[in-house]
Amino acid sequence: MALNHLPPATGKTLQTPDGVKYAYAYSAAAAKKPTFLLLHGFPSSSYDWRHQVKKLSELGYGVIVPDLLGYGDTDSPTDLERYKMKKMATDVSLILEKESLETVIGVAHDWGVGILSRLANYFPEKFSGYIFMSVPYIEPGPFPLDAINAMTEQNFGYTAFGYWPFFNEDDAGDICDKNNTSFTSLVYPQTHEMWKTDFAPLGACKSWVTSNTVKPLPTWFPESEAATHAEIIAKNGYRGPLNWYKVTIRGLNTEDEAQIPEENKIIKTPTLVVVTDKDYVCRAESANQISPKSIPNLAIKTILGCGHWPTLEAKDETNEILIKFAAVIEGRGKLGDI
């Protein structure tokens, strides 16, 4: 369904060895042009890359855009174990293998960054470069949710990840399904400041959704596109997408990530981290915490006046950034000039 909105890319499927179906869109590159792997976040689908697919394809770049596990036309298993990062990263690597893509430029937004980070650890040979959007590269290891919320409350006056405990509740998916219009109007907010007051603080998101509060959508997310988004989400509902949070909160990735060799935690290829100054959950300050030892060949780009959704809200600037990064990979530009 989401794949029908990504011309000229063609919808395709892959079945993993354990029987999970993945849906993805693919448009091959022109001769000698690189291919972009585009990984969406929560609560999205391949549809969130529609503006980038159109522009990149017009310029001859290849694009391969999966609906990640739990989303769109991809299966949505009920087993939490199936949402471990190592398993999902392996799934995406199989899609690249199916299309005989030796190397790609990996681009990820939001939770897609989790997948791209593990792809960088487990399958670095498949990537010529990385772009992490809204969330920097995530080093392997436990996620200290309580400590992060305490730190952000002290530094910024609110808990940046205070909605996570609600997402960890077993019935959170059903609540969001029942009040989808309300949830969408909060996740795609009319004003950036809504996230500081109504989404990020502890208990605020659950209160908003259970009371079925609805606000107008922003101009960069028109009603027609919101209707398509709602149709895509409705196919599987929110239970699968929220499993990504549950797996991380409950420490189900910890054992796998403890076994990643130290040398595989270092990203050696060109890497760009893109942050936005009006994202009040995935704050731009997070980019300052990246260790130069983890990514020696790193540049950081800040999009001004933009919230959490640069692929939509700042689509033209996002496209320009991707095109300039491709020039770096092709040897026609410098990472520091993006």
Image: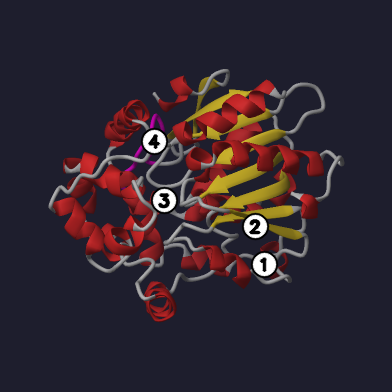
Q: Earlier in the sequence, mark 3 or mark 4?
A: 3
User: For the residues carrying marks 4 and 2, which lies nearer the camera in this image?
Assistant: 4
Given residues 321 and 326, the one toward you in this image is 321
Give the CA distance from mark 2 to mark 1.
Answer: 9 Å
**Classed neighbour count for the residue bearing mark 2: other residues with Cα under 10 Å, few (<14), some (14–19), many (≥20):** many
Q: Are marks 3 and 4 in contact (CB under 8 Å)?
A: no
Left or right of 296, for residue 239 = left
Q: Are marks 4 and 1 in contact (CB under 8 Å)?
A: no
Q: Which residue is mark 4?
A: 221
Instruction: Choose top left, top right, bottom left or bottom right for residue 232.
Output: top left
**In the image, what residue occupies the spot 34% across and 48% down?**
189
| Residue type for callout 1 | Pro
How does the figure colour the protein chain or chains?
secondary structure
Give the CA distance from mark 3 to mark 2.
Answer: 17 Å
**Classed neighbour count for the residue bearing mark 4: other residues with Cα under 10 Å, few (<14), some (14–19), many (≥20):** some
* Residue 73 in the image: above or below residue 4: below
Give the CA distance from mark 4 to mark 2.
Answer: 34 Å
| Residue type for callout 4 | Phe
**Classed neighbour count for the residue bearing mark 3: other residues with Cα under 10 Å, few (<14), some (14–19), many (≥20):** many
| Residue type for callout 2 | Asn
**In the image, what residue occupies the spot 49% across and 67% down?**
255
Q: Which residue is mark 2?
A: 121
Q: Earlier in the sequence, mark 1 or mark 3?
A: 3
Q: Earlier in the sequence, mark 4 or mark 2?
A: 2
Q: Which residue is mark 1?
A: 261
